[in-house]
Amino acid sequence: MPFVTTGDMMKNAQAGGYAIGAFNAENLEMVQAIIAAAEAENAPVMIQTTPGTLKYAGPKCFAGLVSRLARDAKVPVALHLDHGNSYELAEECAREGYTSLMIDGSKLPYEENIAITRRVVAMACGLPVEAELGTVGGKEDGMVAKPQYTDPDEAADFVSRTGISSFAVAIGTAHGVYKGEPKLDLERLSEVRAKVDIPLVLHGTSGVPEDQVRECIRRGICKVNYATDLRIAFTAGVKKAIAEQPDAFDPKKYLAAGRKAVEERVRELIRLLGSNGKA
Ligand code: 13P
């Protein structure tokens, strides 16, 4: 299967009433696990990296790794910049071969968010671009944000003035680990859906109860992001392997346990999102 952009993936999901899983990877093992899970479930899949992850291992590293593995994968695989925090990073990712970009100007004043998003859309020359309005709360890449909900009318204006391909809504989700059960503003999601016809994206989904995720998809979400959930699964797998074999010194042994844990979790999540069998 080719290494693909996210355009058709998300349009098919929108038409079919399911969502594409967009899974954050931090290393080789997580990339392998996500692709293996998608193949096992016959699902199109997105791998994504935040700016923090790209500080750890740059766009060259992830683009090289994912594009090569995607070429031999049995399902469509895309590579997306998650929460791109500058024009320069978005440009570097596009140059290195990412097939999808997010520019996150959501913390900027409204007109500045529009301006930077328009610049990235122009630079991307047809690559799909995601942007966000309002703020998903919680902690991502060490930055703490207070949630600020998306205004549906502003959303319609933002989408028509920027030309983006997908739109991230802020409806009460937060990045990181939730302290209590998240309360999502589902009515607001439906209002945004009524005014915006491009694919909608849900951030901060780790810890959101399954019935609420399904309801979000029913109301128009067609890309769902998971990061924290997979970090927890990977770390738990590695910790368990080291606890069972405290004398192990070969990283391959315990990293493989992390990889297996992520693969199992991604398979469950793909089935929750309904993208299984859709490759
Ligand atoms: P979680 O940290 O809740 O998994 O959110 C991930 C996300 O939205 C990445 O953009």
Image: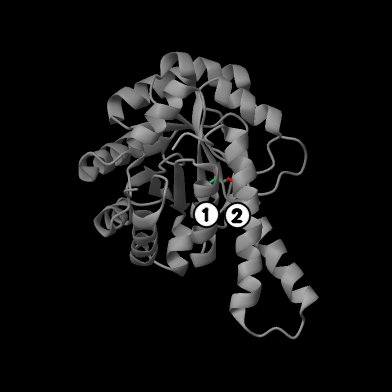
- The answer to whether residue 146 of the structure is visible from this angle is no
Image point (78%, 39%), residue name: 180
Circle 1 residues within 10 Å: few <14, some 14–19, many ≥20: many
Q: Mark number for residue 36?
A: 1
Residue 61 percent across, percent down from the top left: 37, 67
Identify the amino acid type marked 1: Ala
**CB at disc 2 and ligand 1 closer than 8 Å:** no
Image point (69%, 48%), residue name: 177
Point out the tag, 2 or 1, that comes first from the N-terminus.
1
Identify the amino acid type marked 2: Glu
Residue 235 percent across, percent down from the top left: 67, 64
Helix, strand or loop for disc 1: helix
The answer to which image quadrant residue 76 occupies is: top left
- 93 with respect to 169 (left or right): left
Residue 134 percent across, percent down from the top left: 50, 32
Height in image: 209 above or below 264? above
| Contact between labelled residues 1 and 2, with CB atoms less than 8 Å apart | yes
Which quadrant of the figure contains the C terminus? top left
Helix, strand or loop for disc 2: helix
- 181 with respect to 253 (left or right): right
Q: How many marks?
A: 2
- Which residue is denoted by mark 2 in the rendering? 263
Height in image: 173 above or below 264? above
